[in-house]
Image (cartoon, rainbow, N blue to C red):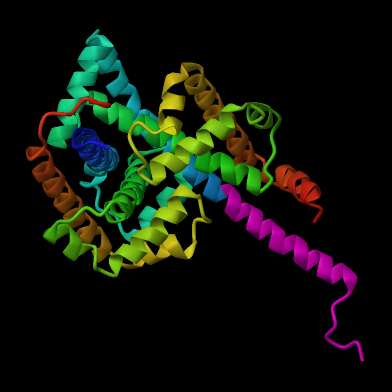
């Protein structure tokens, strides 16, 4: 076996690894943007109703009425879209770890016990657990999870942008 | 000797009450989950309309999406793409529980005989586990435009069925419990 074919194989392997890394970077970015899209729309609905100051009890009663009509208002839109944002954000965290991405800010935040709460929430939302399932209730009882999730989303965004800034031109597949 | 022991009739009555409470909660849960699908669809509609109005080629749209992805900033197009994926995925979550909890409605059940259900299930898995952006289970649904119309029909049919439950809960509950054998 000559040295040139070995070099060729090594170059192919390096190229394939680079393509995989880029695909993972793109996939994580798209998944984060999906979570962002739900959040952007959720905040829009939230800001429509924010001037109307209501107690938690009033909000719960209103939500129940909307559910009975099976017709959204700003409250149920905000509630639903923010639920999907949080659940989608966990999907990003899951793959960030599985694919071995590293970043000091992100990795520090992922050590939080809130991650387990978010995982339970993801399961409850994406598998439609009963509305009083523990995965849903756990998050509503820990309001600081939402603040932590905002920081986590910001950290992911910063880390992925930094990774994109170092990306060389996209190699040709099979090159 | 039998003091405190429940009769067969009492046990049956208790089982019916428990089942009624459980099914009632399931029906409310399905309604709330469908509202999530609707919230996504409502947010999606104006974005799709704006993208279509631009009359750009697929190539131009693809280029824009690539640039937006590297900036991590949603454009109308990437936002629409993300919301559409979530519509399909959350709709499957509703369908899954509709079937698991043995809800039944002629229009819904007919639509759920479609092979698109499997496609939707795979899409849900790929989206909710942030699989590769070009994963075959994400692309497959995006490429089958008739599946989009079918998904709209499923949402509409489930919404109608659930509204029927809310408007006339007693006959629906009785029929449902009979089907469950309670």
In the picture, measured across the screen, residue B11 lies left or right of residue A128, that is right
Q: Is residue B173 magenta?
A: no
**Magenta span covers which residues?**
B1-27
Position of the N terminus of chain A, as image quadrant, is top left
Q: Residue A68: x and y, percent?
A: 52, 44
Can you see residue A70?
no
Residue at 46% over, 40% down: B124
Q: Residue B87: x and y, percent?
A: 42, 34
Prevailing secondary structure class for the magenta stretch in the rendered image: helix
Q: In the image, is residue B93 above or below residue A5?
A: below
Q: Residue B37: x and y, percent?
A: 44, 36
Residue farthest front in this picture: A1
Quarter residue A98 falls in: bottom left
Residue at 34% over, 43% down: A81
Q: Nearer the viewer, residue B156 or A36?
A: A36
Q: Is residue B10 magenta?
A: yes
Q: Nearer the viewer, residue B88 or B43?
A: B88
Residue at 12% over, 39% down: A164
Q: In the image, is residue A83 above or below residue B40?
A: below
Q: In the image, is residue A109 above or below residue A170?
A: below
Can you see residue B87?
yes
Q: Residue B126: x and y, percent?
A: 42, 40
């Amino acid at each position: 076996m000559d040295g040139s074919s070995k070099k060729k194989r090594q170059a192919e392997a390096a190229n394939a690894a680079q393509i995989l890394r880029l695909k993972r970077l793109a996939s994580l970015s798209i998944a984060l943007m999906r979570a962002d899209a739900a959040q952007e729309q959720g905040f829009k609905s939230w800001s429509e109703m924010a001037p109307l100051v209501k107690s938690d009890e009033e909000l719960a009663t209103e939500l129940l009425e909307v559910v009975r009509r099976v017709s959204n208002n700003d409250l149920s839109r905000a509630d639903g879209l923010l639920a999907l944002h949080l659940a989608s954000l966990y999907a990003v965290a899951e793959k960030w770890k599985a694919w071995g991405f590293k970043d000091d800010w992100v990795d520090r935040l992922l050590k939080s016990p809130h991650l387990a709460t978010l995982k339970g929430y993801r399961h409850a939302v994406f598998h439609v657990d009963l509305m009083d399932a523990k995965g849903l209730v756990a998050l509503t009882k820990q309001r600081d999870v939402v603040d932590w999730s905002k920081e986590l989303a910001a950290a992911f965004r910063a880390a992925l942008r930094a990774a994109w800034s170092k990306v060389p031109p996209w190699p040709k597949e099979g090159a | 000797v039998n003091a405190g022991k429940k009769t067969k009739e009492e046990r049956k009555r208790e089982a019916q009450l428990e089942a009624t409470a459980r099914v009632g909660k399931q029906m409310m849960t399905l309604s709330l989950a469908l509202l999530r699908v609707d919230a996504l669809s409502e947010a999606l509609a104006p974005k799709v309309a704006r993208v279509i109005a631009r009359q750009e080629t697929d190539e131009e749209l693809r280029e824009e999406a690539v640039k937006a992805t590297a900036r991590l900033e949603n454009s109308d197009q990437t936002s629409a793409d993300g919301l559409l994926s979530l519509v399909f995925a959350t709709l499957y979550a509703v369908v899954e529980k509709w079937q698991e909890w043995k809800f039944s409605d002629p229009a819904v059940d007919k639509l759920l005989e479609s092979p698109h259900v499997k496609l939707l299930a795979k899409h849900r898995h790929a989206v909710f586990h942030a699989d590769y952006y070009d994963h075959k289970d994400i692309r497959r649904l995006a490429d089958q435009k008739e599946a989009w119309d079918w998904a709209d029909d499923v949402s509409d049919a489930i919404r109608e069925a659930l509204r029927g439950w809310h408007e006339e809960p007693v006959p629906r509950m009785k029929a449902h419990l009979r089907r469950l054998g309670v």
